Image (spheres, grey):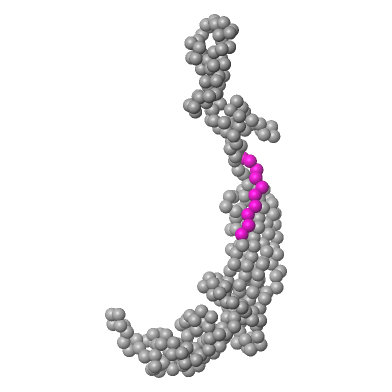
Amino acid sequence: MDAEEWSLSGSDAPLIERTDLKEKVIEVPLTMEFDRRTTEAVKERVARYFSSVRVGRFSVGGPKPEDVEIVKKDLKYVPFWRVQATYACRYVRRGSYRLKIPRDVEEVKVYGKLQQVVGQRRRLSDLVAAVGTSSGVGYGPVRVSLTALEGAMKSGVQNVLGSKDREMGRQAELTISDAEELASFAQSVRLCFNANLGTEDKKMFHALENVSSFDPLSKSARRHCVSVLYDKEEVIKKTKKVAVRRPDISPSRIVEHELALNRLELVYVPFYDVNVEAKGQRKTIKLNALTKEYYKL
């Protein structure tokens, strides 16, 4: 959803984008070498990728790990975008409030507009009826002394205003509805994208968070880098879609909002492309040197 579709009324302020941050190009240090132990682990893992016949829980016809031969292994550096962005928004919305007021207040005007008091306002006839009940005076042209009427009136009004019965008494709350509020909202997002495929990669994000230190991209690594197909402009667009979102309460109008990039890194992660052969068949797997995960190609 675009920001201009959020508001219920009025025109929105344009989104300010502070995304001219220069990317930092770094690499994950290579700590995994193809020693004897790694080679044995690779053979055992990839043996299952060759064709075999499955009988129940068992597979027959597949090669044993010792039958697997590593024909070729190529070191490649796969690029990932790591980005952090902050979005902040100030907006106008509609709201309502309930305030405690003195019990003898019957109506309130705010800026000349009459506000509603919670509960049904008592009519003067209700007061008169209560007075009549408390003094023994009913409806009709019954004459009573002024002193008696004043005493009954005072007693009746006290009974009405002090009554615990919500129908007899009135709640001492004021409801201010359709109030215009100026509110703010902000959030920060951290994302990771495969710069070769253009897909978000949460698993790689967490793996990179655990790397203690990175190195500047070296000349030797540059010779083995996979091309960046998902460029800076594309990753900013993707980040914008995630970071810029509507506040929880629908705004009447966006007063100002801003998107800022706090971090933009192009991280190259070492992978091994391994060509293996067994029983006349060849397979290629990809081994992540950072997470030690295998991918069948």
Q: Is residue 129 left or right of residue 105?
A: left
Instruction: Residue 153: name its quadrant.
Output: top right
Q: Classify 48 as above or below 240.
A: below
Does the image show residue 215? yes
Residue 38, percent from left and from top? 47, 88
In terms of depth relative to the viewer, which is nearer, 229 or 43? 43
Residue 149, percent from left and from top? 56, 10
Residue 192, percent from left and from top? 58, 71
Q: Is residue 288 left or right of residue 244?
A: left
In terms of depth relative to the viewer, which is nearer, 41 or 17? 41
Does the image show residue 252? no
Q: How would you classify the magenta stretch by its main secondary structure?
A: strand
The quadrant of the rendering that contains the N terminus is bottom right
Residue 9, percent from left and from top? 64, 47
Which residue is located at x 53 percent, y 17 percent?
156
Q: Is residue 153 magenta?
A: no
Q: What stretch of residues is rendered in magenta?
A: 178-187
How many dots with numbers?
A: 0
